Amino acid sequence: MRPLIAGNWKMNGLTGFSAALARAIREGAPPVAAFCDLLVCPPATQLAAVGAILAGSAVALGAQNCHQEPDGAHTGDISASMLRDAGATAVILGHSERRANHGETDELVREKVLAAVAAGLLPIVCVGETDEQRRSGRETETVGWQLSGSLPQGFTGVVSYEPVWAIGTGRACEPPQVEAMHGFIRQELMRQFGREAGAAIRLLYGGSVKAHNARSLLSVPEVNGALIGGAALNADEFLAIARAAAPR
Ligand code: PGA
C-alpha cells in the first residue's frame, strides 16, 4: 500500500511561519512524492493561504476538525463543506486532544466522519488508549470500542493509531507494541467492513514520530504511514520522515 505521511500542525502557525513551512515542504516534496502521499493539516485560518502555496504540487491539504452539521447556528464552528471550499481534501477527526479537551465521543466522531464524506473530504480517524488503559491491559479493548463506535458503515477513509501517552511526549510506542495493535486493528477493520474493504483501509501510526525513529516505525507490518505532530513543524524533519517511508 502506498504510504501516507501526514502533518498535523495543531494550533501552530501564523501567516509568515505557515507560508514558509508550506513552501519548504512543497520544494522538498518531489523525490518523496514518488513513493508516498504527503498531506499537511494547518490550522483552519491558514488553509486557503497554504492551499494556494501547495496548488499544483504533490502535497495535499487537510484540516484538523469539522462540525457534524452541514450548516446552521453553530457559532465558531466550521463545516466540512467550508473546509472543502477552502481547499482541503482531507480532515483529521477524533484526535485524542479533541476527545479529551472537547468531550468528543465515538458517536460524535462518527457523525463528523459522515459529514466529512458528504462534503467530499477524506476522513482520518484517530484512535488510541491512555497510559492508564494500557497499564491495566485494556488497550485493545479500548481501541476496539473506538473503532466500532467511530467508523460508520462503509467507511473507506484512513485510521490513525495514536496512543495518547505517546503524543507529544517523545516516547513513541515501541515497534512490537505497534505491530500488535496494528494487527488487531486490521483484523477489526476486516471484521467490520469485510476482508477486502478492511484490508484496503490505510492505517497510520502517530505519537512522537521523528526522523530518528521513523524507519523502524514505518517498517512495522500494517503500518501504512504516519501522522506527525511536533516534527511536522519543521520541513527538513517532516521530509526526512517521509524519506523513511521509501520502499526497501
Ligand atoms: P506528536 O503528535 O508527533 O507531536 O507526538 C502526534 C499527533 O498528535 O498526531
Image (spheres, grey):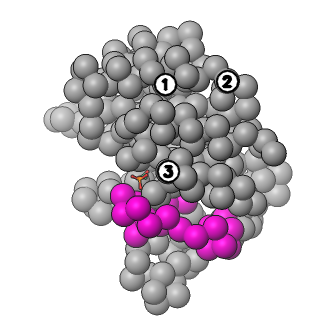
Q: CA distance from mark 3 to mark 1?
A: 16 Å
Locate residue 60, reporting x and y percent.
53, 25
Decide if residue 159 is in sight here. no
Pointer 2 local density, CA inside 10 Å: few below 14, some 14–19, many at least 20: few
Is the distance from the Cβ of mark 3 to the nearest ligand 1 atom less than 8 Å?
Answer: yes
**Above/below status of 89 relative to 91:** above
> What span is colored magenta in the figure?
161-182
Give the mark nearest the N terminus, 2 or 1. 1
Question: Which residue is pictured at 68% across the width and 34% down the height?
Answer: 36
Name the residue: 35% across, 20% down: 20
The quadrant where residue 234 appears: top left
Residue kind at label 2, given as amino acid type: Pro
Circle 3 sits in a helix, a strand or a loop, which is it? loop
Secondary structure beneath dot 1 equals helix
Q: Earlier in the sequence, mark 2 or mark 3?
A: 2
Disc 2 versus disc 1: distance between alpha carbons? 11 Å
Residue on which the image places disc 1: 25
Q: Residue at x 50, y 11 (%)?
A: 55
The amino acid sitting under disc 3 is Lys
Mark 2, secondary structure of its residue: helix
- Residue 46 visible somewhere in the drawing: yes
Quarter occupied by the N terminus: top right
Which quarter of the rendering shows the C terminus? Answer: top right
Residue 139: % across, % down: 53, 78
**Residue 147, image x and y in percent?**
56, 63
Q: Is residue 116 left or right of residue 83?
A: right
Picture coordinates of residue 31, whole percent (x, y): 67, 24
Binning the other alpha carbons within 10 Å of mark 3 as few (below 14), some (14 to 19) or many (20 upward) gives: many
Which residue has dot 3 on it? 210
Mark carried by residue 31? 2
Amino acid carrying label 1: it is Ile
